[in-house]
Image (cartoon, rainbow, N blue to C red):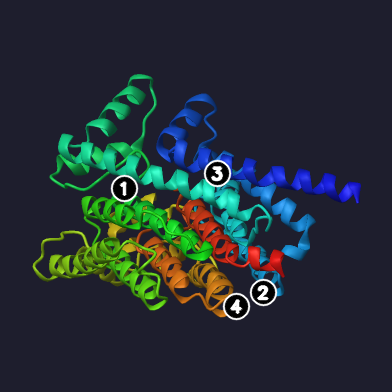
Amino acid sequence: MLSDKVSERRRASVWPLALLLLFLGIALTPIGPRRAIIMKLFDPGSLGWVNYPAVVAAVLMIVWGFIHRKEYDRFDIFLMYLGLVLLIPITVSDGDVYFRKYCAALLNVALPFFVIFQTMDRDRRRIWLGRNVKVLYVLSFILLIFGVIEMISGGALVRIVNSLFNAHGMKIGQYDSFIEALDGGKRRFYSFWGGAMFNSLIFMGIFIINDIYYRSIGRTYRKMLLAIVTAAGIVLCLDQAAMILFGIYLLLSCFAQMKAGKEAEENGLSLIVCLAVGGLLIIGGGLMQIFGILDYPPVSRDMLNELRDYRANSVDSLLLYKGYGTATIYNSNFADYGDAFGLAALMMSLDYGIVFALVFTLAYFAFFTWKVLIRKKRFVCWAGITAFFIQVNLFSGFGMINYDVSWITSVFIMLAVNAVYARYDQEAFNG
């Protein structure tokens, strides 16, 4: 009995540390500056892209989860073994893949996949999730303030940070591309963390996590304020897909709330404003496309034209079971076809093979669909996770070693699934 209590205390210490490391690796150390510092100090090549705090956090959670195998059901185990099989295409990829790039792919693409299966301790899950959603709530406001400043100043903050790094002999290629886009007349929100679609993904994710958590525990929160902040942030990013996806989810969330008879608990004005925001985002996103206001939709004409040219010229055909190496698009053979691989599935097909891209993507989708929709019948929560996952797949960061998108996707799904299951923790203890 004493040993069980000691084990439980040790187990309780793993999750706060892991969550802190994830926050440190994803929110506090953006990949551009992080890689520049690592390259300056150690020059590890492709390993400079690795999110080391997140790797440590993942190892802690995964090892602890396997020690307590009762936390996994059969479907989880099946998908984890499938994940191990998926490592093979990374191993046999052709092109310029060498040992360090292979290790970077394992740590920044394969390892995050196993994070989605991790389950928090049931007696502490609500506490840890509650702390995290509050931090994320505040982070959304901070990100919006950055966005407003950057839009007004023409990217002054990114320019200042980029100049400081350049002065110390550290180059951040990502920031250089942001500045080039801004100087070329593009007015979208580029931040320290990533480009416009990346930022809209973060805005969406923060709202959906908050909404799923408070929906699951049956409490109200300042939904209207967060909805306005999220919508404003997405509009600053000029991300048509995110506008429509977030608008649809917001409407679903409000309608479900009204159907459940909770409009009295939630301020009536809040619901009306949220419905209006959701509707305006959907209409606005559609009008932007119809009238050509948006020059860069998720599937652009340039992308389709370059994809057609790529197929016609047959530089190198996509392969079923293996690819040409991680971040192949930067190789000379593919440099003229960058826009052709703007979607995650296409980029992964090029890097690792078509089978890897399809199975890897479907494994993520199958996991949260099984956990949330099939097992718990939580349609609105599943719709929120699905909207986030669709947005993830509309740009090429997912599955690439030189972005944190795979980490962010896996952490989001892990937190969202745990938030859904937090609904049943108190019922289990009372039972």
Q: Is residue 106 visible?
A: no
Find the residue positioned furthest to the top: 168
Q: Quadrant of residue 250?
A: bottom left
Callout 1: helix, strand or loop?
loop
Residue kind at label 2, given as amino acid type: Phe
| Closer to the eye: label 2 or 1 | 2
Label 2 neighbour load within 10 Å: few <14, some 14-19, many 20+: few
Callout 2: helix, strand or loop?
helix
**Where's residue 141, x and y in %?**
33, 43
- Mark seen at residue 22: 3
Residue kind at label 3, given as amino acid type: Leu
Depicted 250 relative to depicted 398: above or below? below
Callout 3: helix, strand or loop?
helix
For disc 1, the marked residue is: 195
Residue kind at label 4, given as amino acid type: Arg
Name the N-terminal-most of marks 3 and 4.
3
Seen at 51% across and 62% down, the residue is: 352
Name the N-terminal-most of marks 2 and 3.
3
**Where's residue 340, x and y in %?**
30, 63
Decide if residue 422 is on the left or right side of residue 181: right
Label 1 neighbour load within 10 Å: few <14, some 14-19, many 20+: some
Q: Are marks 2 and 1 in contact (CB under 8 Å)?
A: no
Q: Give the Cα distance between marks 3 and 4.
A: 28 Å
